[in-house]
Image: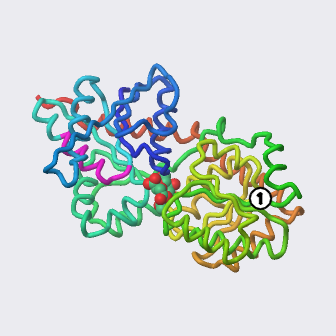
């Protein structure tokens, strides 16, 4: 098939999932056209089936806000027409689903009905989307899509709870490329970070409030009272300064390192003993799955789709949001050398359930179903 993929090209989970999906589809022979405002982070190599179309946003002194959605819709129209796409798959409802609706209507006037699939990723529903400033457009554009998927059952239920959605929502969970995300031999890195064989704890995120990064610091502080440990932060974002201040106040800065927006996160995960994800809300928790694929057990909150990914007591533990005491106690249990190898093995085993090989066919089948039920050409 010839498929257009629209996403945020940055480090966020939705952009990662969209890019990895496009790459996996291209490897199976589909022609994949990415339409974004800059090159997606993980799209940094040549493949004959992968194409990239940059949205050109022209500004003008009159525009206090450049009209990105219009530029995006126009690029969609051009790519769909000139590349003769069979399907448009947009990731993250705002503003991709509404821009897709506009593109679809424009193309209808020219006799083409392009099927549009919207994948909901989480914050487009649970945070930003349900805000009154976006809600009517989000509701409308979800209902106007030809197909809608959500990355967890919880997100599907949240969508029905917060929006008057009449569409069926198909749950297709996120996935992982186990060729890339696997434990690599990085002993030199472990020795450099943990010269005294300390246990290594890792957190990766965009450091937004919703991630509760402060809980990560407090859990680590409790762990370190009992055993030798180091904490690595991967990523960056608005909470970074507060977190650094808290580390100083708790006098743990020497054991905490901020690595910034690392692309090769799997190298860090390869030497980690525990991953912390205490989020307020998490529709799926892709970063936790990446950790599990690298044989790292996870302590997470019990919010959103995390209980669908984690197996409590096996792949790690699932605790109430904000229960730092329980998370600290359970972290120490996992990090005990008598327990750690079993948790690591269970984490890897669970990650295999989300192997791209298992999930990709679900998308392909869904694409075919949606294309079949959408008339391609209006006569
Ligand atoms: O977590 C974020 O703030 C980024 C956000 C995004 O849209 O990129 O992530 C969401 O989508 C990911 C991919 O489907 C999910 O794994 C994350 O759980 C989800 N984040 C939230 O629900 C907060």
**Vertical side of 337 occupied by 358: above or below:** above
Other-residue count near label 1 (Cα within 10 Å), few / some / many at <14 / 14–19 / ≥20: many
Query: Which segment did they paint magenta?
Result: 92-104
The quadrant of the image that shows the C terminus is: top left
Total of numbered circles in the picture?
Answer: 1
118 to the left or right of 234 = left
Quadrant of residue 242 within the rendered picture:
bottom right
Position of 55 with respect to 187 (left or right) is left
Indicate the colouring scheme: rainbow
Position above or below: 93 against 361 = below
Q: Position of residue 109 (x, y in %)?
A: 10, 34
In which quadrant of the rendered image does the N terminus lie? top left
Classify mark 1: helix, strand or loop. strand
Which residue: 45% across, 40% down? 363
Whether residue 178 can be seen here: yes
Query: In the image, what residue occupies the spot 29% across and 37% down?
Result: 55
Asked which quadrant contains residue 316, the reply is bottom right
| Rendered location of residue 32, percent (x, y) | 40, 29
Q: Which residue is mark 1?
A: 200
Measuring 46% from the left and 34% from the top, which residue is drawn there? 22
- Position of 168 with respect to 311 (left or right) is left
Rendering coords of residue 321 (x, y %): 57, 75
Is 182 or 64 nearer to us in this picture?
64
Q: Magenta stretch: residue 217 in it?
A: no
> Magenta part mainly helix, strand or loop?
helix
Q: Is the distance from the Cβ of mark 1 to the nearest ligand 1 atom less than 8 Å?
A: no
- Residue 96 shown in magenta: yes
Q: Nearer the viewer, residue 316 or 219?
A: 219
Coordinates of residue 359 in the picture (x, y in percent): 53, 42
Residue 175 appears in which quarter of the rendering? top right
Q: Is residue 315 visible?
A: no
């Amino acid at each position: 098939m010839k498929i257009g993929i629209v996403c945020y090209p940055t480090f966020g989970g939705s952009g990662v999932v969209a890019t990895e999906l496009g790459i996996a589809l291209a490897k199976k022979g589909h022609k994949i056209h990415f339409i974004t405002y800059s090159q997606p982070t993980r799209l940094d190599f040549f493949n004959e089936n992968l194409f990239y179309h940059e949205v050109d946003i022209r500004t003008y002194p009159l525009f206090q806000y450049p009209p990105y959605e219009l530029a995006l819709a126009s690029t969609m129209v051009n790519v769909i027409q000139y590349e003769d796409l069979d399907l448009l798959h947009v990731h993250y409802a705002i503003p991709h689903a509404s821009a897709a609706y506009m593109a679809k209507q424009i193309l209808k006037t020219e006799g083409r009905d392009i099927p549009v699939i919207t994948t909901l990723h989480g914050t487009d529903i649970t945070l930003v989307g349900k805000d009154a400033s976006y809600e009517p457009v989000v509701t409308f554009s979800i209902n106007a899509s030809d197909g809608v998927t959500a990355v967890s059952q919880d997100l599907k239920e949240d969508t029905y709870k917060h929006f008057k959605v009449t569409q069926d929502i198909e749950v297709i969970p996120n996935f992982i490329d186990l060729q890339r995300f696997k434990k690599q031999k990085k002993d030199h890195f472990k020795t450099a970070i943990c010269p005294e064989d300390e246990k290594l704890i890792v957190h990766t995120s965009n450091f937004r409030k919703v991630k509760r990064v402060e809980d990560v610091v407090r859990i680590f502080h409790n762990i370190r009272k009992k055993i030798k440990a180091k904490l690595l932060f991967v990523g960056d974002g608005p909470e970074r300064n507060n977190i650094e201040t808290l580390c100083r106040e708790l006098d743990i800065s020497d054991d905490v390192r901020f690595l910034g927006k690392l692309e090769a996160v799997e190298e860090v995960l390869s030497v980690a003993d525990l991953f912390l994800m205490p989020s307020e809300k998490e529709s799926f928790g892709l970063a936790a799955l990446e950790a599990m694929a690298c044989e790292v057990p996870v302590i997470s909150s019990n919010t959103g789709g995390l209980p669908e990914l984690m197996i409590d007591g096996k792949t790690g533990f699932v605790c109430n949001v904000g229960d730092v005491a329980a998370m600290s106690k359970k972290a120490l249990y996992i990090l005990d050398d008598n327990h750690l190898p079993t948790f690591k093995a269970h984490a890897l085993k669970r990650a295999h359930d989300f192997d791209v090989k298992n999930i990709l066919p679900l998308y392909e089948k869904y694409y075919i179903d949606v294309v079949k039920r959408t008339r391609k050409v209006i006569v």
